[in-house]
Amino acid sequence: MITPDYTNINLKLKQEEGKTFVWDGVRKKWIILTPEEHVRQYMVTYLADKLRYPMALLSVEKAIMVGALKKRFDIVVYNRDHKPWMLVECKAPEVPITEKTLHQLLSYHQTIQCNYWVLSNGHQVFCADATDTANIKWLTSFPGYEL
C-alpha cells in the first residue's frame, strides 16, 4: 500500500445554490463535489503537482466501451506518445478497496491497456506494475513518469 502525502494540496472550491463544486483542471470545468469526486481531484492534483505527471497527459471521466457496456474510467495518465500508461480507479472514502474494485479496474484494462494500475479511496492507495501481466508487482510508491 502507498501512503500519498496530500499536505499542501488545496482544491479550488465554490458554493452555488447550496452545493459545493470543485474546479477540475483536466476537464476545465466546475464539478459537483461528491465523496468520489473529492478522491479523484486529490489524486489528479497529487499526480500533477507532487509527482509532476504532466496535467496535459491526464484524462478524467471519459466514456469507454467495456464489451457491450458503456462505462467511464476515473483517470488515465498517458505517456508522451499519447498511449495509456496508468489507469486509476477511485472510490469514495467509505468504500473499501476490495477484489471487486480490482475486477472493475481489470474490466477497464481490457479496453485501455496500461503499464500501471492504481486503486484509491483516498485512505487506501494501491499501485501495481502491470508491464508483465503474468507477474504483477504491487508497489510501495508511485512510478516516476516516463520521459
Image: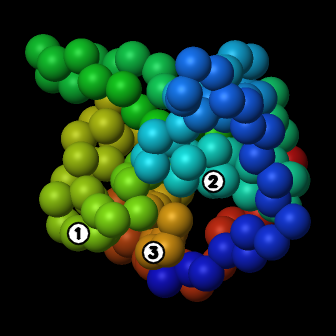
What residue is at 69 percent from the left and 17 percent from the top? Answer: 29
Q: Which mark is residue 32?
A: none
- Give how far across and how far down residue 48 sits, in percent: 80, 48
- Alpha carbons under labels 2 and 1: distance apart: 19 Å
Earlier-in-chain disc, 1 versus 3? 1
- Please name the residue shown 31% across and 37% down the image: 108
Judge whether residue 21 can be spotted in this image: yes
> Label 3: which residue?
124
Along the line of sight, which residue is nearer the eye, 61 or 111?
A: 61
Q: Tag 3: residue type?
A: Gln
Marks 3 and 2, how far apart at CA? 12 Å
Label 2 is placed on what type of residue? Met
Secondary structure of the residue carrying tag 2 is helix
Residue holding disc 1: 98
Image side of residue 75 versus residue 101, left or right: right
Residue 89 image offset from top left, x and y in percent: 42, 49
Give the camera-side residue of 63 and 145: 63
Q: Examine the image and state in which quarter residue 96 appears.
A: bottom left
Amino acid type of disc 1?
Answer: Thr
- Left or right, residue 58 beside residue 104: right
Q: What colouring method underlies this structural image? A: rainbow
CA–CA distance between discs 1 and 3? 10 Å
| Location of mark 2 (residue) | 43
Q: Quadrant of residue 124?
A: bottom left
| Residue 38 picture location, percent across and down | 56, 48
Going 63% across and 53% down the picture, which residue do you hit? 43
Q: Earlier in the sequence, mark 2 or mark 1?
A: 2
